[in-house]
Amino acid sequence: SADNIANKVDAVIKANRLAYKREQYIRELTHQPFYECTENGHAFFFNDALLDLLGLDVNEALGYGWIKSIVDFEQERVLAEWERAVRYCSEFKVEYTLKNSKHKVLSVAKIARDEAGEIQFIIGTVTKIS
């Protein structure tokens, strides 16, 4: 019925508003550089602290753009480690050097899986170590 469809549309709108508010709060409250991405490394969320550290704006960093922030000679190694971690592990942990600042950083991501081993979400942080 039309009422049923309208109720479903309202529920989707509410869910989207809640997700947007969640994202805003995370950006505001999380001072540790923080990201969320898919299992193939496609990033869809960065907080401001991480964008500042990477030296990229959100449009440059989204998707696979974050890779541009890593010095060229380390990009392949970082991506290989990512692939290994999502295939076999519950955590991604790798050091690399940022192109813009030459800072060495440690990226750690937790890979949440369901009972069947399917990835549910991946959330990570990046810490400047030198």
Image (spheres, rainbow, N blue to C red):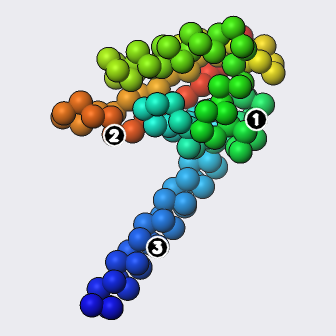
Residue that numbered label 2 is attached to? 120
Above or below, comparing residue 112 to residue 22 in the picture: above
Quadrant housing the N terminus: bottom left
Question: Residue lying farthest right?
Answer: 100
Q: Amino acid at mark 3?
A: Ile
Around disc 3, counting alpha carbons within 10 Å, would you say few (fewer than 14), some (14 to 19), or many (20 or more)?
few
Q: Earlier in the sequence, mark 2 or mark 1?
A: 1
Residue 53: quarter of image = top right
Residue that numbered label 1 is attached to? 56
Q: CA distance from mark 1 to mark 3?
A: 30 Å
Around disc 1, counting alpha carbons within 10 Å, would you say few (fewer than 14), some (14 to 19), or many (20 or more)?
some
- The structure residue drawn at horizontal position 40% and vertical position 78%, both measured from the top left corner, is 9
> Camera-side residue: 106 or 41?
41
Q: Position of residue 12 (x, y in %)?
A: 41, 71
- Helix, strand or loop at mark 3: helix
Residue that numbered label 3 is attached to? 13
Q: CA distance from mark 3 to mark 2?
A: 23 Å
Above or below, comparing residue 13 to residue 48 in the picture: below
Question: Residue lying farthest left?
Answer: 115
- Helix, strand or loop at mark 1: loop
